[in-house]
Each structure stands twice: as C-alpha cells, then as structure tokens.
Amino acid sequence: MRKFLAIALVAAVSLAACRGGETATDDAGVKTDVGVTKEPCPEAIDKNKGCIYLGIISDLTEGPFKALAVPITDSQKAFWKRVNQQGGIGNYEVDVTKNIKDNKYNPQVHKEVFDQIKSNILALAQTLGSPTTAAILADLKSNNIVAAPASWTSAWAFEDVIIESGANYCIESMNALDYANDTYKPKSVLAIHYAGDYGDDAAAGAKIAAAKLGMTFSHVKTDSGGDKQAGAITEVVTKNPDLVILTVGPAETGAIIGQAAARGFKGRFIGTSPTFNPALLQSAAAPAIVALYEQSAPWNNWSTNSKGHQAMREALPGVTPSEGYTSGWVWSYPLRAALKKAVDNKDLTRAGLLAAVKSLDSVDYEGMLPTNAGNYKAGVAGQIKMTAIYKPDPKAPTGGVQVKDLYVGPTASSYTLDGPCFSKL
Amino acid sequence: MRGRPLLHTSYGSDMALFNTMSKKVAVGLLILVALALPFGLEDKWLSLLATCCVAAIGAIGLGLVTGYAGQVSLGHAFFFGIGAYTSAYISGDPDGRTLGLGQTNMLLWLPAAGLVALLFGVLVAPLATRLRGLYLAIVTLALVFIGQHVFGEWDALTGGTGVGRAPAKLELFGYDLAATDSIGTKDQKVFWVMALLLMVFALAARNIARSKVGRAFNAIRDRDIAAGVIGVNLARYKTVAFAISSFYAGCAGALLYTIVGFIEPGSFSLLLSVQYIAMVLIGGAGTISGAIAGAFFITLLPTITRELQPLVPFVSTEASKVPNIFQVETILYGLLIIGFLIFEPRGLFGLWIRIRAYWKSWPFSY
Amino acid sequence: MVDLIEAVVRGLGKGSVYALLALGFVIIFKATRVISFAQPAFMLAGVVMVSYFVGPLGFWGALVAAMVLTGLLALGVERTAVRPMIGRPAFVVAIITLGVDVAVRVVVVAFIGLNVRQVGDPWGLKTHDLGVITVYERDVASFAVTAVLVAALFAYFRYTRMGLAMRAASYDQEAALAQGVSVGSVFALSWAMAGGLAAVAGTFAAAGESVDGLMWLIALTALPVIILGGLDSLAGAVIGGLIVGVLQEIVANYQSAMPWLGGNVSIITPYVVMLLVLLVRPYGLFGTREVERV
C-alpha cells in the first residue's frame, strides 16, 4: 500500500513539472514576454534574428467576406515578408504565417480560435469583422494585446488596443451622403444593413447626415445570403427612396440591386467597401450595378500611383487584382510603426507595444493615406475622416474607377464622435 | 460471492449501478484521474477537456431521448440555445447592451436554464408524440430553424445575428469559479467543476435508465405500439423523455458557453444538432458511457486533425490552397460518421465490447 | 392587388425549385424508405457543374450534362454509402446521408473557389410585362421546365416497365422481388433521378443570381415541403413545393407591415406552415398513414 502511495506521489510531482508556464526573458536589452522568441522564424531570411509572432484571424472559408479576406491575408503575408527583406524590426523578423485561423465570420468561432493562438502571439496583425472583434475585445484589453482590425466601425476610435486605419463606416456614410447631396440631391435615404457593429454603424452615420441635410431616413436590417433579401428588395421597391446606402456583403448587393432594378427601381445605391466584389460585374445584376451603384472607400484603390501602392503591386506579382490586397497592405503600416517604436524603447512586451501604440502621433503609410492619419496619441480627435468615391467599371483591374478623391464632407468634419455610432441608430 | 462476480444473490445487487468489482474500480480510477489531470496538463488541454465534459452532458440528454427512447430528435440545438440564453439572461449585466438580471449565482441560473428548457420540451412533446420516425425528425428540425429565427431577431436578449452577447458567469455565492487564484488557474477550476457536474448528470442518467422510466423508454424504442398494448403510457413517457433530454440540453447549453465565452445566435443551428446526433451514434446509441465516449471523440476531433497535420504535409494550412486543413476537418467529420455507422453500428461502445469480449475469453477468443 | 399577383408568380417560380428538390427526396423515400440528406450536396454539385460547362456547351447543354453527371454521382454515393446499409433503421441511414452531404459539399465548395460563379442562364433578371403585371422571365421558365419534368416523370411511372417496377417496389419490396423486379436497380435508379432533379433545381435557383457555397440552405427548405405534402406522395411534393414557394413570397412581400415578427420571417414560413398542417394531418396533405404490424 505504501509503495503504491509513493509511486503515485512521484508521478504527481513529475506530472506537475510537465505544466509549462510563462516566462519573461531579456535579450540584448529588449524586454519581451509573449510571442517573441530568440529562435529565428520558420521562414527566416536572416537566421540570426529572433522572431516576433503575430496572429491573423480572418474569414477564410465560409463567411460572406471570404472573397476579400483571403487577399487581405495574402497581402499581409507579402507585407511582412517585405519588412523582413528590408531587415526586419531591430533584431527580429516578423512571422504572420504560423498563427492564421479561420473565423467563419462568427463571433463565437472567432473567440474560440483566438483562445487557441493567444498564448503564441505578441499581437494580432489582423482580426476580421466588427462584431467578431467585439467578442474578443475584453480579452484583448485585459491581456494588453494590440490588434489591427480588418473593419472600420466607430467603436475602435475609443479602444487603445485597436489600431485601426481609415475612416470608420459612420463617417464614411456621412461623406457618402454629402457627396450624394452635391451630385444628385436625394430627398429620401434608405439604409440596408447587416445587424451589429458593421451594418448599424454605417446606418447610424447615414441617419445623422440625413437629419443634418434634411433628408428623410429609414433603415431595414437584413441577413447574409443572396436568397434572404426578399424583404429588403420589397422595402426598396415600395418605399422608392432616392438613395440607398448598402452595408452588406457582395452576394446581397448583387441580389438587392439586380432585383430592385428589374422591378423598376431607378434610385441610386452607395455601398461601403466590403459590399463590392468585381465578380459581381459578371453576374446578371451587372448592368444594374454599373448604372446605379457607387462605392465609398477609405483609401484609393489598387491602381493608384503612390509609393505604397507600387510596393504592394511589386510584392504581389501575378495575382488577380482585388481591393482586399490594398486593404491588407494599408492595415499593416501602423503595426510596423508601433513595433519599430517598441523596439526603439527596448520594450517588446505586450504592455510595451501598447504604450508604443499610444505614443504614435503619425504613421508612414508610404502615400496610401495622408500623413495626418495614424494619430493614435490624440485618440478620438485624431481620427481620419476622409473618403473616396468609386464607380464600377468592368474594364478596371479591380472593377472600379475613381469618381472623387479622398475628401472630408461638411457633415463629417463638423461631427464630433462621442461614442460608437451604432448605438445611435 | 468471492470469485463469482456475476452471481447475484439479491435483486438489489443485480440492479446496482456498480454491480461488479471491475466497474467499481474503473469508476474509482476515473474519479482519481479527473482529480489529478489538472496538475499534469496544460491549460489549453484542460479547457478542451472541460468542453468535452459539457458536451457529454448534452450527449447524454440526447442519448436518453434518441438512444433509449427511440424518439429521433434533431432539435437538440434549440434546447441548448434556450438554456444558454436563460442562464445568460439571469446572470447578465443589467446595464449592458442586452437584457440581464444580474444574478450570477450558479445555483440559480443552472437549474433555471434546465427548467426553462424542460418547459419548452414539455410544450413540444404533444406534437412529437403524434409523430414517429422521420416525420418526428423533420418536425424537430423545424424547431431549430424557428428557434434560430427567434434568437436572431430578439436583439434585446441575444444581441442579434452576427453580434451575440456574453454568457453566464461561473460564480457560486460570490466566489468566482472561473478566476485564477490560489486554488488553481481558471482552466483547472473550470475543469474540476465540469467534471464534477458530468459525474452527477451521468449518474442521474444511469439511474433513470435502470428504473421503471428507463424500461418504459426501451419498450417504446423497440416497438411502441406493442408497448402501448402492454400498458406503457406512450404519451406520458414520450413527454418525460423529451422533458429530461431538454433539461440536460438546457444545462449543457448554459455551461458550454461559459467556457466558450461568447454566444452568437447562429451557433444553435442544424450543424449543432447533427454534431450531437453524431456523438450519440458514434459513441453507441442506447448507452450512457457510449454517449460520453462519443462526446469526447467528436469534441477532440478538430484538435486531433490539427495535430496530425504535420504528418500529412500535402494538406496545407492556408485556406486558399486545396486540400487544406479546414476542408480535411470537415470531410473527416462526415467520413467518420459514415464509417462508424457502416462498420461498427454499435459505435465506440461496440468497439469496447468487442475488445473486452476478445480479452475475456483469451486465449480462446475466436 | 398587382403586388399580390406578382408575388404569386415569383412564388411559383421559387416553388418550382422546391418542388423539384422535394420530388427527389420523395422518389428516394418511396423506393428505399429513407430520407436522403445528401440532396443539398447534389444540388450544389449540379449547379457548380453547370457553371463550369456553360462555357463550352451553352446553357441547355450544360444543364443536360450536369443532370447526367450528378445522377452518376448520386449513383456512386448510393452504391458505396447506402447499399451496405440495407436493413438498418431508416434513421441511421439518414444520418449516413448527412455525412455524405458534409463530405461532398466540402469538395464542391472547393471547386467554387473564392469568387461566386455564374450559371449563364438566358433569362437573368429580365422581366416581361403582362399588362400591369411585371413577371420575371426566369420564374416563368422555371415553372415551365418543372412542369415538363413533372409530366415526364408521371408518364414514366405510368407507362414504362421500369416505372411500373419502381412503383411496385415502393409498395412492397418483397413482393416485387418475388415478381422478378430487380429492387437493387430500383434503388440505384431512384437515387440517380433524385440527383438529376437536384441539379436542375439548383440551376434554376441560381438563375439570375450567383452560385456560392451557401446555396445548399435552399435545399433544406425542401424538407418541410415533403412533410407538408406527405413523405410518400409525388403529387404532394409538387403541390407542397408550389404552396410553400407562393406563401414564402407573399409573406416576404408583406412582412415589413409586421415588424414585430422580426425581419425576414419569410425564411421560417415553410416550417410554420408545416407545423400547422401537421397538427391537423399528421401524415401530410397527401401522405398515407403508416400501417405497422406489431
């Protein structure tokens, strides 16, 4: 009996040793904790450098945005490869390939896969979706994990751990309404939107702008799925607004515009950037889309000639152009700037990276966004408010040509964000 | 009698839950392992195992209604959702974006979740008792879709489709069961709680199965008309079957999302129902330990596929290449269902019986 | 009033798709007494095939080719996954077909790729004006093709030897065997027919819209249709499909007037209708009451 107890005790103690733990290590004066190793990255260019691991959680298989999300992810991989080729960040190279997870655009799956990778990464290079990122926000804040979201909801303006780029949907809708007001003076606006921080945000912006510009406003919520748009289409056809603001996915855009036009609707549509996909120009709804649709965008598209755009095109040779690549590339600049600053401050812990983010007052976007973008130090007041307008063109590489360059409309410039817009819907 | 374990000399010992020595030893060992595991495994494995335990509770519930009573129910996901939202509502923050009562004590929300789900099960039962076989299966499927619609549209309670809300908090009279402190880390404590709850629920189910109610279930499954003829009250026992399974599903739903950390209405879909049916069928319909084994197997499957990926290099981890790990996970799931049902219809439990029978009569096993 | 009639016409078009899918389910059920949950996968496979063949073969050629190939796929599935399960409880086989559905769908979605695909149908979103009423050409085409297929099916079952054999096998398999009917080939043929019908249904569901991985959910609506019509009634499948399609469109038209029901309540209309009908007629509108010997 005693032998049995002794064996059990030894087993228990040795098992307890199997449990790993988190250790903080110092290296050449730079403090690190999670997600940074002395060993080189798996595909390291310079094998003498250590490795910073960043995570990517994106909609890679099933959700409504996978046509954009896969190029976004590929573009980010190319971006950080270019950073490594240019010497990395301090004594480290950056790896974004080992911790890629699929979230199926579902907040619950997003949280589950985040739990799987969170002990391996320093920060998130991409977390796609507004409601999905909202699901892990509390976790991000309590663990000081910085995240670059693939989304533009106005809630991010109030979160330190989120390093967003580009004007949020609320402001974008205000700019879209200002543009519409200048161009064809609509009197009534209908917003068709997904539920949640993505759709509600743009609809709220449209509501605020419509009130300021004296237009009547109504909104209808819809689900994802091209065959579930019967209610939204009926709403468009019966209410017959002059302008419809779309904040849905590409499949829904095709269904709504195509079928509304077929039933005689002649008003205009403006959609936020995730609503469009060049493949729509091959579908039966293409003529209606070309005639009636315009797209608002937070930055200029693939074909633009700026230093950053050119670098992106060179890093991604031979791909079918898609705005997903542009977005993924632009989103990565702030994180690069923050990592550089953290290494300069010799503090590459999670808390150190967060402090670096909070101290950034400008980010070098290599011309893809103006220099006053990326002012995280100023918080909400430093938010960029510029939007560009594009219209569909089957001959353009990514399906769109510019109608109006980045501008700030009067509604947006006079509006102060005092809380996330979507709560005002 | 010593040396003659299968010779029972009293009705009590025959009907006992642990009527052989080996069963007693096995259960004792399991309890010891469950107590000791948190000291040896890393947190993420413990979190996974805790999820397995909760899934087992749900699978036991479904096993009772589908395996024991033969009433095919594809509506399990609906009761999961009811349980999850009831518990989230009771323990939710009253000032948050969604409705909440602020009562975070587990002794309040866990039974409440089960009871509300049980109520819905009883409501559904009259329709279910009139139908049999595939008609019943599809009608329970309708429950899932209608439930999804209601959950998705009722923004105030659930946050709405694609948005979701926070789940119940694991607290007992103010003591936070899911926070790291001197007794153990968060995942260790959660695992102990879930393992304990699984043992309680499994014991209760086993007890039901060997009682009059369980015998009535078996009779209904085998030939319900004949059972009615010999005096089993069909409507009553079918209702009891649905009620018990909904109670289990409600409790499992409430507990599952405390581990996951977030509830999105789209999760309570046909896919979830099918997952639990797969657990029951692959584990072995008609047995409690089969349901538990099936639950552990199916819940661990995605992790096993992921860990095996380095061994199969032509399967890539990137979603844009074919074949990739996400596709393999899904196909494997479908193929396993087919494989088990074709080759081992009694499931994992049947496999165990075969192995045990082989070794029992070794070296004369042929 | 005009709204209502337009909604009815749209519903007839949509209902034809449901009717074709439901026919597939019912044909398999009548022959093998099993519900095949693999129909969504066959539908998706058929429509993806059409999207690939429409380039070289044109729309109608692609449709016929997809019908044949999907029928062969269904045949293959029946041989490998379903044939070994003869004699097992119907529920277990249904779950196997569910496993098949999951596996086949993953493969088919991989062929869809990142961007949505087009079926290249000749109607698109074109409309036609009949007086004050505007109808979509694709709804009319869908209804017409379904009518032709249903008529052909009924003629087949009524006037050909194989059709007679299938009807005999659906009444009583043993007696049919005793009469020399090859019940095995009845099984195989019924699966093949269901696969072909699913391919046509999917193509018309995608007409004017795009093919993406989430289309399979349309096939799930065929389940309340078959329950509504009666699991073993071909006429019930067709009529049920049309009724469900029309009701869905009418509810979609007027659902904005009742926002308390939640948006998009037209999606669960088929299930609600099914539940209501089952309360009154537990075996569906045209189903036969199961007689069981104890």
Image (cartoon, coloured by chain):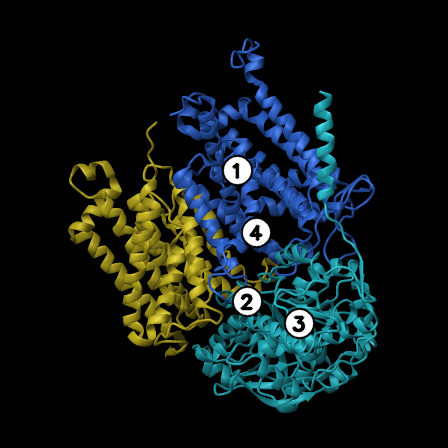
Chain colours: A cyan, B blue, C yellow
Element class at badge 2: loop
Question: Given contact means CB atoms under 8 Å apart, are the residues at marks 4 and 1 in contact?
Answer: no
User: Which circle, 1 or 2, is nearer the viewer?
Assistant: 2
- For disc 1, the chain is B
Circle on res. B307: 4
The answer to which of A361 and C183 lies nearer the viewer is A361
Percent from the top left, x then y, of residue B207? 59, 25
Circle on res. B125: 1
Whole-number angstrom distance, CA of label 3 to CA of label 1: 67 Å
> What amino acid is labelled 3 in the image?
Asp
Residue C259's image quarter? bottom right
User: Which circle, 2 or 4, is nearer the viewer?
Assistant: 4
Circle on res. A46: 3
The mark that comes first in sequence, 4 or 1, is: 1
Percent from the top left, x then y, of residue C281? 40, 43
Determine whether, in the image, residue B41 is placed left or right of residue A237: right
The residue lying at 39 percent from left, 66 percent from top is C48
Whole-number angstrom distance, CA of label 4 to CA of label 3: 28 Å
Percent from the top left, x then y, of residue A241? 58, 79
Element class at badge 3: loop
The residue lying at 35 percent from left, 51 percent from top is C25
User: Which circle, 4 or 1, is nearer the viewer?
Assistant: 4
Q: Against C160, is A198 above or below? A: below
Element class at badge 4: helix
Percent from the top left, x then y, of residue B278? 49, 43
User: Which circle, 4 or 3, is nearer the viewer?
Assistant: 3
